Image (spheres, rainbow, N blue to C red):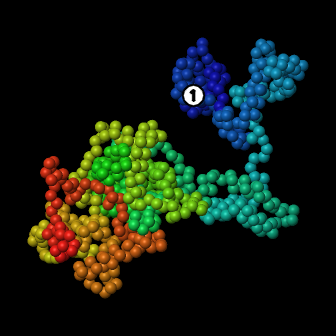
Amino acid sequence: MSSSIRFNKGGSFLLDGREVQVTRVINGELVTLEDVMSLVVYQHSMEQLLTWWADGRVTPKPQAEQEQAQGVRRNPIAVLSSYPEKWVNRAIRKKCYLDGLRQLGVKIAFTETKLKPLIKRIADQLGDLNPPGPSSIYRWFIKEKRYQSPIGLLDRFENRGWFGCRFPAEVQEVLIELIEERYLESPGCSIKDIHDALRVRVHDLNILRATDAQLALPSYDTVRRAIRAYPAYEHAVAKYGKQEASIRFRTSMVGPKAKYILEAAEIDHTPVDLFVVDERTGLPLGRPTLTILVDRKSKMILGVYVSFGGPSTEAVFQCLRHAILPKTYLRERYPRVEGIWPCFGLMQVLICDNGLEFHGDALEQACFELGIKLQFCPKKKPYFKGHVERTFRSIAAGFFHAQKGTSLANWMERHDYDPLKTAVATFDEFMHALHIWIVDVYSLQVNRGQKRTPLAIWQSGIHDNPPELPDLKTMDQALTEFTERTLWHYGIELHKLRYNSKEIFPIRHQYGEKVAVQVRYNRGDLGHIYVIHPSTGEAIKVPAIEFDYASGLRLEVHELICKEVRDAGLAETNPLNLAKAKERIREVIGQMLGSKKLQQRKRAARLSGTNSQDTNLVATPSAAPAPKPTQGVPRITVTPKQFKSSFRQWGQGGKP
């Protein structure tokens, strides 16, 4: 709290941080000021001083000099409400008595004979049954005059008593050393340990001292107060570490905001708090991993990808693909979804954390090829992509935790609840329910910060920034991993599979018998690869020589098949050996799905390629919809000759 400012003779205040004093006032319009330090005299108009006061250049002189000399604890500019209410009421009572004396219109004589009847009259007006004495009135008057403000009437009980530590300097130094070296250093210790260690140190100091000069041991409460005097941030650093303490004591201001839709999108992974069961066996397969993309402007979920493979580059690519493409499969695949999911298009900035799957060269090149800027958050600071983190919380609280088989956010909250016994949702049912929640629940909930629904913000933002779609072939090639291989006469060997076609023959004819080329491949389908032409940069699609074996084959399953062949001592390049091993692996995966161990069932789900890409019917050039038959013309079904059925009945004319 500060004193008031008076532009009369003798008044003093601060002008631009320098103390000045009013020496003369002429006709109430011109004010002469004298700088207290330099004794320079200035003259300003009253109007100019009032303007400077409104701009904050004229401020009252602080009353902290005398109070700091006396060891005042409370800041002199503290607001009135920071004091206890009973202190404020006492100050108001004092002010009422002083104002009452001034309103009498007589010269106040501070004597007992003159003041007693005046005090009694004011007390009767205020209804005060315990009026103050004349000496109290005099003290209040002096305090108000000294502080030049009624604030000086407040009782300063916090300034009474002894300030500082009464123990000798040797004990203080030992106590400070123990606190800083043991309590405020990892792993820390208890206050009782500090007090016991201080007891030993004081005893060692007293050995060399005379009997009449022994040092006293501070009490436990004194040690506790000394420890509590350190800032809370230092306590957090000692208990949790500097990184965690910085997060706990961070200051959250207004974060970066997107001006239009698809300006920035955030991506991240999280384990699903829900156990999914196998459709055939009914046994829980485990908790899949959910990858989502959230638009920073509208808070709409742009794309999702669910699999049992955990965070990976493949999950990032598939989520990007799902976010960019229109959701045309929604009505056909999930008929119970009532709303629309209009999100599609390329985002300008992709914001992600520092996971290994985001720092790969494949994602960097894919974003560069699609015209997306890749932006990373600082390490161990997930709140830099708070929109996707908040969306995860909404999905968990509004969807996962309300379903049977939920694992809850914390396993300690389960108590006697066993999610493995209550899990009932298959993977397809889970995806169906997830789409219903995203389209019909999340996108229609009013965002507390923007006061609108994410769907409404997206639909209004389409007019300002229409979404941009890439070339489908370019996107398919970009969202793949790449490596470098040598092109031989038999083609290219990748992951113990060979790829060759007539389209890549001209490369060897031009550059030599063996040529180093860049190869792009998809971990989820080894049936074909893309070979980049060394000069033109064209991506040439090359199928596998053993296409029947490699088509739709995941890399993890192929590596498992190769291991099975090696363990049997057979040749890995023999198609028959690979085909037999593939069938054995298929049987093993089927047995693993029925295993009693959850870890085995989850591994089987991962190897079988259970993911949302297979359930979402996204249109591609290779999977065009079948043409509808012409109206009025019956559709003819052609059956191969060797599989034609016989119309003869059994027992009439021999075999069917």
Give the farthest residue toward the right. Answer: 113
Q: Count how many numbered circles sit on residues in the image.
A: 1
Give the farthest residue toward the bottom. Answer: 569
The answer to whether any part of residue 417 appears in the image is: yes
In the image, 5 versus 154, the foreground residue is 154
Q: Amino acid at mark 1?
A: Val
At x 72% / y 34%, what residue is drawn? 85
In the image, 567 versus 346, the foreground residue is 567
Rendering coords of residue 550 (x, y %): 25, 71
Rendering coords of residue 270 (x, y %): 44, 58
Rendering coords of residue 505 (x, y %): 12, 70
Rendering coords of residue 315 (x, y %): 36, 61
* Quadrant in which the C terminus appears: bottom left
Q: Would you place residue 3 above or below residue 522 in this image?
A: above
At x 17% / y 67%, what residue is drawn? 647
Residue marked by disc 1: 58
At x 34% / y 50%, what residue is drawn? 335
Q: Would you place residue 495 above or below residue 115 in this image?
A: below
Quadrant in which residue 21 is drawn: top right
The answer to whether any part of residue 349 appears in the image is: no
Q: Would you place residue 25 above or below residue 264 in this image?
A: above
At x 40% / y 57%, what residue is drawn? 429
